[in-house]
Image (cartoon, rainbow, N blue to C red):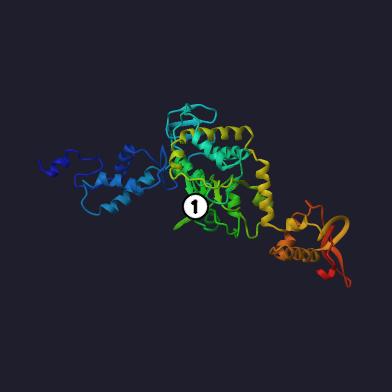
Amino acid sequence: MNENEELQSGFPDWLTEDYKLMEPVFCQAFLREHPMRCIRGRFYTVDGPVADESSLKQKIYEEISPWLETKIARKVDELLNALRMAAYSEPIALECDRIHVANGTLFVDGRFSPEKIYCNNRLTVNYRPDTPPPEKWLRFLSELLYPEDIPTLQEYLGYCLLPTTKGQKMLMLIGRGGEGKSRIGLVMRSIFGDSMNTTSIQKVENNRFSRADLESKLLMVDDDMDMSALPKTNYIKSIVTSECKMDMERKGVQSYQSQLYVRFLCFGNGALTALHDRSDGFFRRQIVLTTKDKPPGRMDDPFLSEKLIAEREGIFLWCLEGLHRLLVNNYRFTISDRAKENISVVVREANNIVDFLTSAGYVQFKADSEAATRDLYAAYKVWCEDNAENPLSPKSFSGFIAQNADAYRLEATNNVYIGSGKRCRGYLGIEVLIRPTAL
């Protein structure tokens, strides 16, 4: 039997006698062999999104290459596009009552089913309820974080297991460097797999195409946060609290609407700041945990990541405990006094107007007093000079005072007398203490 006769013995249904390929029949046969759905142009299996379509192209090539001799690469691309249409499906609804794990489906109420169904995200970790506690992981955290902050991390990592943003928070781990905090990101990669993205928080805000990369992601890790201030913050704030669809852009594709549920976990040597946004909304969305200093003389273990990843099934159960506690508390995180003070420090460092208003000798709050905005700003500049601080612009200063007037019990007025028959804008309830010559 020659080669052609051998091929004829296994002649496929999708090929005519004159070797013309019938695309609809091929797609039906291929999808029977490799069940998939195509959602918004992306293929999904029961294990979640197909991360790399090259593997699909390879399978198509293996199917057709024995029967076609020319233009095979082009035909592979054509068949891949035909498969997109044949496997078309509506988007999969977000399911916040279950977690799709590698060996089945775990429901939040504790039920487990080995059945695997189509889903937006499937973790790469198995659910094994009898797994012992992750001792190395717990010891690592006890050396990294203060005891009162560990429950916060546990709840946040558990929060990332569900496709929801109801917690409306992003988590920052701040340290001097060398503590090992970035090991957490590597461990999370071993649990979340392709449901986690590693990129820069700066890129998410500034690159209009980067937000589309966060689709169908549960977690985004920035393991070396850029310390430069963000020029704007509207996208990050929207993503952290996202509860509806937002505009997405991909290169060469018409913009479209999609819902993001990604959570941000950032590691750095300093807090996230903004050039212009000093609003409560920007800082309210952040949880800031500070790490312990690296002990002098500590020898780092180059295999620490591998040892922690080996405990990932136990770490997953540990994260589940945090999720259950968070759900009981109605998505309110456990925030220690230390973490609350961290945010206060971040606010003061990002906006020295706060320290100016609480300083002594420059201004005082007094019910029957008044001060012009220009005089308040002049006193603020003197305070900055005395404290080696850079003053914010007059617009930023007046904007902050206006936005926070109620918090400081101030009343805006445009009737502050400044001499020579002139009256200008200012506030009732505050007095400038510095002599006019100093201003």
**Residue at the location (60% across, 60% down)?**
231
Q: Position of residue 205 (x, y in %)?
A: 55, 56
Residue holding disc 1: 199
Which of the 4 quarters of the picture holds residue 117? top left
In the picture, which quadrant includes the C terminus? Answer: bottom right
Q: Position of residue 22 (x, y in %)?
A: 27, 45
Q: Nearer the viewer, residue 9 or 332?
A: 332
Q: How many other residues sit within 10 Å of disc 1, few (<14), some (14-19) or many (≥20)?
A: some
Q: Nearer the viewer, residue 148 or 101?
A: 148
Q: Nearer the viewer, residue 150 or 198?
A: 150
- Residue 159 shows up from this direction: no
**The residue tagged with tag 1: helix, strand or loop?**
loop
Q: Is residue 238 toward the left or the right of residue 434 in the image?
A: left
Q: Position of residue 206 (x, y in %)?
A: 54, 58
Q: Is residue 166 toward the left or the right of residue 195 in the image?
A: right
The number of callouts visible is 1
In the picture, which quadrant includes the N terminus? Answer: top left
Q: Residue furthest bottom?
A: 420
Above or below, 120 relative to 360: above
Above or below, 422 relative to 105: below
- Residue 109 shows up from this direction: yes
Q: Residue furthest left?
A: 1
Amino acid, disc 1: Thr
